[in-house]
Amino acid sequence: MVVLVTGSTGFLGRRVVQELLKHDHQVRCLVHTPGRERIFAPRSVDVQYGAVTDPDALASACRGVDTIIHLVAIILQRGSATFDSINRQGTANVVAAAKAAGTVKELVQVSAIGATSNRRYPYLYSKWQAEQAVIESGLPHTILRPSLIFGQGDEFINALASLVRLFPVVPVIGTGRNRFQPIQVEDVARCIVLALGRDDLKGKTVEIGGPEQLSYNEIMALLADTLEKRRLRFHVPSLLVWPNVMLMQKFLPKPPLNTEELRMLSIRNVAELDTVEEVFGFKPRPVAGNIDFIKSIGSKDAWKTLLGFMPSSMRDH
Ligand SMILES: NC(=O)c1ccc[n+]([C@@H]2O[C@H](COP(=O)([O-])OP(=O)(O)OC[C@H]3O[C@@H](n4cnc5c(N)ncnc54)[C@H](OP(=O)(O)O)[C@@H]3O)[C@@H](O)[C@H]2O)c1
């Protein structure tokens, strides 16, 4: 069985590829930036270079493929790479290429908790539009909507941990009471691969999260415990943060926070607590005890992260 993974070199994609290889699947990777395939062992995967905006590249990538795992999405718009061109149209292009190939029997679409038809949340709206493209395609599909994903190389936990590393008093945007259900990146990859071939999941949308629902305040406290720091928190109204985040987004290559993440801080970001166990048959890992990677963040790395230049030792893409 040939499985095409789009977004294969990303934070989640590389784990999905490893999980597929563990299960002896034949893997084809759509690689956006040539050279990034070097993260995979030589000859372990078949590589197709290209963008989801390029129908010809997608046609080649889909040739002879049985299954597609579609992961490509952006959360930060830059130039012509917009939510509409990548998240919505890119997905429509993947779906069209999959149908034209004539061999694709299933597609797993990775969406996000909170995907919505409400245009006031542009990223989540584009994720909802992508879901619609998949649903309307008529292809047998499963949609997975993860909550916040954490693990080595993530952006969110590393940025918060950088604050905790550097400052005795750390800012919390808003009340900090909104809940998340962080799920470990390897566990998300496991769910995706376990979804393959499951006829009972066809046509379904499954929301997945970790084993606990944590508020932003609790996540901050966990990070401080992991780093063995005592930290006080002060609350900053979201309205005051907006102008700074917009400026960072405009000028920094990798802003520690962007406007879409800021929007998501105030909306529901949780699934049912037992979905992963019920649907996929394993217990997802909690945040506590599984974020030791933040211990290696030095002060210099933390400053770089907060100034929008997260070092490649923390996230290499
Ligand atoms: N991370 C989370 O907390 C989270 C939570 C819920 C849902 N999700 C969803 O999970 C999926 C994967 O997210 P991620 O965190 O792994 O993202 P990521 O680390 O940013 O990876 C995105 C991948 O897509 C590729 N890509 C970007 N633009 C492309 C284009 N125009 N054509 C082809 N490939 C392109 C990137 O390649 P280059 O780097 O070479 O451009 C990279 O391999 C997304 O659909 C996201 O919405 C993520």
Image (spheres, grey):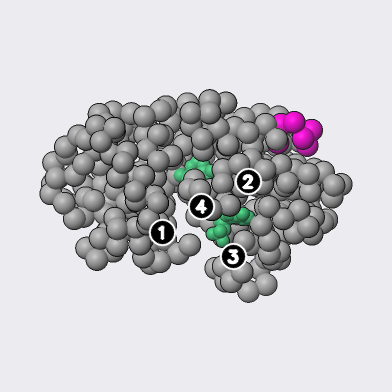
N-term-proximal mark, 1 vs 2: 2
Image location of residue 296, percent across then percent down:
29, 63
Q: CA distance from mark 2 to mark 3?
A: 17 Å
Using residue 234 as the reference point, say whether residue 192 is left or right of it. Answer: right
The quadrant in which residue 302 appears is: bottom left
* The N terminus, quarter of image: bottom right
The circle on residue 128 is none
Q: Amino acid at mark 3?
A: Thr
Q: Amino acid at mark 2?
A: Ser
N-term-proximal mark, 3 vs 1: 3
Using residue 46 as the reference point, say whether residue 193 is left or right of it. Answer: left
Tell me the residue that label 4 is attached to: 78
Tell me the residue that label 1 is attached to: 253
Tell me the residue that label 2 is attached to: 85
Q: Is label 3's Cβ within 8 Å of ligand 1?
A: yes
N-term-proximal mark, 1 vs 4: 4
Q: Is residue 235 above or below residue 165?
A: above
Q: Is residue 304 visible to us here? A: yes
Q: Secondary structure at mark 3?
A: loop
Image location of residue 258, percent across then percent down:
39, 45
